[in-house]
Image: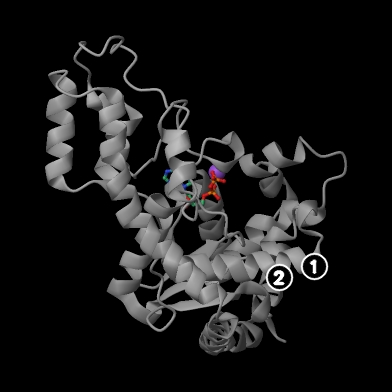
């Protein structure tokens, strides 16, 4: 049996890198595994960042994240979609796991070192983050974790935690694997400086309006070898070429690739030809998001059902864990 678990940051501010690189994969796994695909809006994790010490904002961001992921195709009727803080067992299992985890191992985590190095006072929660993440996954005995490659070290720690618990208290947890194919989709940023990332400010938002997207696309860098309109270009060395592969239909892709290689079209033509695909992809998501924004009960209801479904699994695991630990 396969059970999928993935955490989703509580932000509605997602970009097309998140959409093609993560959300579409969640949707696909959801279609494949149904209620064995479990997605958790990780608000407890968000609290390790002092920027989240704003109760109204955190509530709103959790709501937005749910709404945007639903609008982007994640169907709470089909998968389990819930909020981490609604299922208290995450914290309880997390505590048990902290007692089994050497501090030194946590201090070696790259993400921790990166984040801690920017802070004057480091919250202990930041150090414990990967232990809570292990609890998130193992609470559902998930064996498959779709995450970015930057999470690999945390998933290795999750396996370590599972092994340690199993060795100490008896076989209980699987050792989960992350899934991120080697050729995992990596959406380039609009600045042509590598990966699209919120922290680099080179994003196209899923909820961004078409005019604002065009204002970013129009001046975007293209194949630097193509200086004059009459120079042929290489669409494989152009981020607009990459975007066409994500957004455009086959016919447009063929036209653009031919046109670029033969200098039959200019870069501005190529960029204009991108926009219909962007519109076809994003506008329906934006329309669904608007509809859900007008119907916050639908979002809250989905989360309530999701929490009940998650709790049912979590409680089974905790009852087994409590027996084994002696609680
Ligand atoms: P960001 O780098 O913008 O802060 P996150 O690190 O929060 O994005 O990533 C959330 C999810 O989206 C992860 O699964 C990550 O692998 C995926 N993702 C982020 N940026 C990209 C990108 N440019 N291309 C493909 N997937 C991405
Ligand atoms: Na990132």
Question: Gap between marks 1 and 2, in whole Å?
Answer: 6 Å
Within the image, what quadrant is residue 231 found in?
A: top left
Contact? badges 1 and 2 (CB < 8 Å): yes
Estimate how packed mark 2 is, as few (under 14), some (14 to 19) or many (20 or more) residues with alpha carbons within 10 Å.
Answer: few
Q: Secondary structure at mark 1?
A: helix
Residue 314 bears which disc, if any? none
Residue ID at (24%, 27%)? 236
Identify which residue, 266 or 72, lies in the foreground: 266
Residue ID at (45%, 29%)? 194
Identify which residue, 97 or 170, lies in the foreground: 97
Q: Which residue is mark 1?
A: 55
Note whether residue 42 is visible: yes
Q: Which residue is mark 2?
A: 59
Q: Is residue 117 above or below residue 306?
A: above
Give coordinates of residue 52: x percent, y percent.
76, 58
Residue ID at (34%, 14%)? 224
Q: Is residue 83 above or below residue 310?
A: above
Q: Quadrant of the C terminus?
A: bottom right
Residue ID at (42%, 27%)? 220
Q: Quadrant of the N terminus?
A: bottom left
Give coordinates of residue 51: x percent, y percent.
78, 52
Q: Is residue 244 above or below residue 260?
A: below
């Amino acid at each position: 049996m396969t059970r999928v678990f993935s955490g989703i940051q509580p932000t509605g501010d997602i970009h097309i890198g998140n959409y093609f690189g993560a959300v579409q994969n969640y949707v696909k796994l959801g279609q494949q595994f149904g209620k064995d695909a479990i997605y958790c809006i990780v608000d407890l994790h968000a609290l390790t960042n002092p920027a989240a010490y704003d109760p109204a904002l955190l509530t709103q961001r959790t709501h937005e994240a749910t709404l945007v992921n639903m609008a982007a195709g994640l169907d709470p009727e089909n998968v389990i979609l819930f909020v981490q803080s609604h299922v208290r067992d995450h914290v309880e299992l997390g505590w048990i796991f902290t007692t089994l985890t050497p501090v030194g191992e946590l201090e070696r985590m790259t993400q921790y070192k990166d984040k801690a190095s920017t802070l004057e006072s480091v919250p202990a929660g930041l150090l414990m983050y990967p232990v809570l993440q292990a609890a998130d996954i193992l609470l559902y005995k998930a064996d498959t974790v779709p995450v970015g490659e930057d999470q690999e070290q945390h998933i290795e720690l999750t396996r370590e935690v599972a092994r340690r618990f199993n060795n100490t208290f008896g076989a209980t947890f699987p050792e989960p694997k992350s899934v991120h194919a080697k050729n995992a989709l990596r959406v380039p940023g609009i600045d042509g400086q590598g990966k699209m990332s919120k922290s680099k400010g080179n994003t196209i938002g899923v909820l961004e309006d078409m005019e604002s997207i065009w204002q970013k696309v129009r001046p975007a860098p293209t194949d630097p070898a193509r200086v004059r309109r009459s120079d042929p270009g290489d669409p494989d060395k152009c981020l607009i070429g990459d975007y066409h592969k994500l957004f455009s239909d086959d016919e447009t892709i063929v036209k653009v690739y031919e046109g670029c290689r033969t200098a039959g079209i200019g870069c501005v033509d190529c960029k204009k030809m991108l926009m219909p695909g962007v519109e076809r992809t994003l506008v329906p998501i934006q329309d669904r998001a608007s509809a859900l924004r007008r119907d916050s009960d639908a979002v809250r209801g989905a989360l309530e059902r999701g929490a009940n479904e998650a709790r049912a699994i979590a409680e089974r695991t905790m009852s087994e864990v409590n027996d084994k630990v002696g609680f």
